[in-house]
Amino acid sequence: MHYHVFLSYNSHDQSEASLIFQYLKDSNYKTFFEKDALKPGDIWQKKIEDALLSSDVIIILLGSQGVGRWQEIESRIYQIISTQCIEEKKPIIPVYLPRVNEASDREKFPIFLKQFHEFRFKESIDNEIINLLTHLTCDTSSLNNYERPILSYQQDILLKNTTRCYNKNAEKYFETWKDIISPSLYAFADEVNKIKKTARILDVGCGPGHHSKFLAKRGHEVIGVDISESFISIANKNMKEGARFINLDMRSLFDHFDRKRNIFDTIWACASCFHLTKEFVGWQLDQFNALLKPQGLLGISFQVDMPSAIQEDGRFFERYLEGEIETTITRHGFDIFKTIKEETNKNTFNKKQMKKWCNYFALAPERKIEVTIPNNDGLN
C-alpha cells in the first residue's frame, strides 16, 4: 500500500502524534500511524518495513523524552532506504514538538537527523499545523481505488456520489457558510466593477446561493447554477435578491444556453471545478472560454498541494500542485493576472482539516476567431 506520510513517534508523545495524524488523515494524506495501522496478528516488523518503503515522506516526531527504541530503528531504516533511492528524493522531516528545549533536548536525538531540514512547533499544534503540511510534497493525483486515466463513466460516478452528499447535507452547508464571504470574492467583485457596473455573471457551483446574492446586491445580473437540487431549493428560498438559480450539471452549460457563445461578462467558479478530475477539467475551462465575452473575467479556485481523494462522505476532490493548475488554465486560453492564496481550517463538518486554496483571476482571449464547421449529416 502506498502512503503519503510515515509518522514515527515515541510512545511518550502519542497524544501529540494522534492529533497530527488526525490532521493528516482529515486532510486526505494517507498516513502510516502505528496505533491505527497495526492489527492483531500482523507481522509488525514486516508491515513497518513495507510502509517505510512505500511512503513519500517520513515525519519523525521529536519530544522532550527523545526518540523511542523502535522509532530510532525506523528512522535509521528509512535513512538507508533514502540513501539507496536518492533519485526519488524521499525526504525525512524531523519535527520538534511544542515545549522541546532547543539546547538540552537536542542531545537526546540521533546525530544523523541534524542533516535534514527540520520543522519546529513553536506554539500549539492546532495553530501551526498548516505550516507543517506546506513542507509535504506528495502525489496530488492519488485516488481511492481508481487507476488513471479516469474515464467518463468514472467521472459520472464521482460526481454522482459528490452530489448525493451535498443533497443530504445541504442545510448544514447553508448554515455553515451563509454569512461567510471570503477575501477572494470581495476582490473578484472589485474586478467585476472595473469591467462593467452592471455585469452579467454566471456563478458556477453556486451552492445555496450566498455568493450569487452577494454579487446581485451590488447591482449585477447573476445566474447561479448547481448540480445539487437541495442547494438550488435553498437558494430559491433564501437568496433570490436579484439572482436566479438553475439546477444544472456544469458540464452541460453550453447546451443549456443553446450553444450560444460570448454571453457572459464574468464567470465565478468557486470551489466547484475541483469536483472534476484532471482528465475533464480542461473541457470545463473550454466551455467557460466559449461562454465568456472577449476579455471576459473568470474567477476560479482550486485546492493545491494536497492529495486528491474521495472523502468518507463520498465527495471527490481533485487537487493540484500550484504550478500545475496554472499551466492548465493558461493552456485553455486564459491569461491569469492575479492569484489570491488562502489557508483555512474551516470546513462544513468541523474536522481537523487544513486546506490551501489558490484563487485565480483570468481573462478570456481578446480576439476570438469564429470557425465554421460544415454539417455533413446528409452525406453518405
Image (cartoon, rainbow, N blue to C red):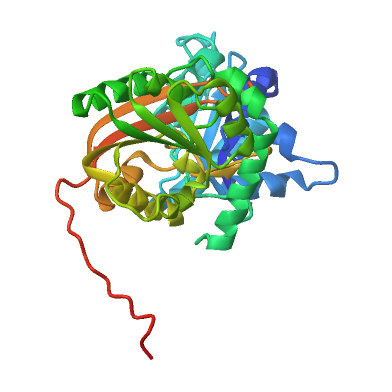
Frontmost residue, 109 versus 90: 90
Vertical side of 209 occupied by 57: above or below: below
Instruction: Spot the residue most to the right.
Output: 41
Residue 274 picture location, percent across and down: 47, 42
Question: Can you tell which quarter of the image residue 378 is in?
Answer: bottom left
Residue 229 picture location, percent across and down: 62, 38
Q: Is residue 125 left or right of residue 185?
A: right
Frontmost residue, 188 versus 221: 221
Residue 62 picture location, percent across and down: 55, 21
Residue 318 picture location, percent across and down: 49, 44
Question: Can you tell which quarter of the image residue 52 is in?
Answer: top right
Residue at x-position 18% and y-position 53%: 368
Q: Looking at the figure, which quarter contains the C terminus? A: bottom left
Q: Is residue 174 left or right of residue 265?
A: right
Instruction: Spot the residue most to the left.
Output: 367
Question: Can you tell which quarter of the image residue 231 is in?
Answer: top right
